[in-house]
């Protein structure tokens, strides 16, 4: 079964909603990589969505969408008919997928996150870092595309598992907390610094389902151990706390930014990905990388 790049009929693929079309091989390998990442690191990897209004063709990408991506991103996108998302790459049958949350594998430590992604991909037979310029969120399947592999023998070594500590709430629920004099609203890969205590209390009541609504009294007070657990469980890097507290995060209205917004009180992984796609990389030089560093800066 062979077609030109971007010319594969969609009915050949496994459709997983939206514009996500997987070959049987990539479908099985992706599911296994998601399972391994969740078991080993407590992180559920997911495919990049429609973050640019181009339809979210981030697995198989037909020739029409390839042209749209090229028009939108210029030379940062592959020339139409040569994309590794299109089924053919440098003379080989290859299919690719873009991962939205690679950095969640090791928040605040991109090098370690990439190393973990490389190991996970290798375990399931996928390839990373094979396009130019480098895209660490981009994985490719160079295996026979139309045969689904079995992974019955793949297992995690319990001695190397590094899963985040559990908390009492469902970790995907948004919640508002009070840590000392600081108030945050947070959920997985999202953090907002609250500057209006009364409004934050109302939001805290809504998110935390408290019985009554009174300014500040309804907020969940947390100690240092709680914050450590939340930071790990919700995959929020320590530098994000410093960014939003200093107003150097993203703008409240969700516009893309470079981390220097005048009233930027929000950080999210999706904002950071959007900025990277626009060619803007957040400079974390000098920002807190650990809890101890953040504590010193707060006290200082």
Image: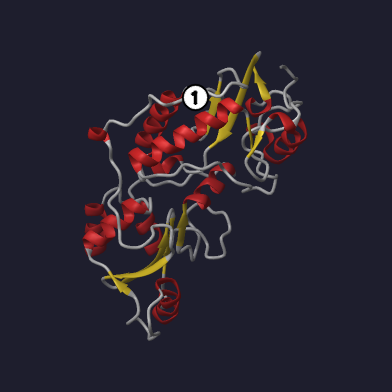
Which residue matches tag 1? 126
**Residue 98, horizontal then vertical, whole percent:** 56, 36
Q: Is residue 188 left or right of residue 12?
A: left
- Quarter of the picture holding the C terminus: bottom left
Mark yes or no: residue 300 visible. Answer: no
In the rendered image, which quarter is residue 72 located in? top right
Residue furthest top as drawn: 91
Front position in the image: 83 or 204: 204
**Residue 139, horizontal then vertical, whole percent:** 52, 29
Relative to 98, does residue 84 appear above or below in the rendering?
A: above
**Residue 207, horizontal then vertical, whole percent:** 44, 71
- Element type at marker 1? loop
Front position in the image: 95 or 83: 95
Front position in the image: 207 or 102: 207
**Residue 46, horizontal then vertical, whole percent:** 51, 43
Relative to 137, does residue 190 appear above or below in the rendering?
A: below
Decide: few, some or many residues near mark 1? Use Cα within 10 Å; few <14, some 14-19, many ≥20: many
- Quarter of the picture holding the N terminus: top right
In the rendered image, which quarter is residue 166 located in? bottom left
Q: Is residue 42 left or right of residue 34?
A: left
What residue is at 28 percent from the left and 30 percent from the top? 157
């Amino acid at each position: 079964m062979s077609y030109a790049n971007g010319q594969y009929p969609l009915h050949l693929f496994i459709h997983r909603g939206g514009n996500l079309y997987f070959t049987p091989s990539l479908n099985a390998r992706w599911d296994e990589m998601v399972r391994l990442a969740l078991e080993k690191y407590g992180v559920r990897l997911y495919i990049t969505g429609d973050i640019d209004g181009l339809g979210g063709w981030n697995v198989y990408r037909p020739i029409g969408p390839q042209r749209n991506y090229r028009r939108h991103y210029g030379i940062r996108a592959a020339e139409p008919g040569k994309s590794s998302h299109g089924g053919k790459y440098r003379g080989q049958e290859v299919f690719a997928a873009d991962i939205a949350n690679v950095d969640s594998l090791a928040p605040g430590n991109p090098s370690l996150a990439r190393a973990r992604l490389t190991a996970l991909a290798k375990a399931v037979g996928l390839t990373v870092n094979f396009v130019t310029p480098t895209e660490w969120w981009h994985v490719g399947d160079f295996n026979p595309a139309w045969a689904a592999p079995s992974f019955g023998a793949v297992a995690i070594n319990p001695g190397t598992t590094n899963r985040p500590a559990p908390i009492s709430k469902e970790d995907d629920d948004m919640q508002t907390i009070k840590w000392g004099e600081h108030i945050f609203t947070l959920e997985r890969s999202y953090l907002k610094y609250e500057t209006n205590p009364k409004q934050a209390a109302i939001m805290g009541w809504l998110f935390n389902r408290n019985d009554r609504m009174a300014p500040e009294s309804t907020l969940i007070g947390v100690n240092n151990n709680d914050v450590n657990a939340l930071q790990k469980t919700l995959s929020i890097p320590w530098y994000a706390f410093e960014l939003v507290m200093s107003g150097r995060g993203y703008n409240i209205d969700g516009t893309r930014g470079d981390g220097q917004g005048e009233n930027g009180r929000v950080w999210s992984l999706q904002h950071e990905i959007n900025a990277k796609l626009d060619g803007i990389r957040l400079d974390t030089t000098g920002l807190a990388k650990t809890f101890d560093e953040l504590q010193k800066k707060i006290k200082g």
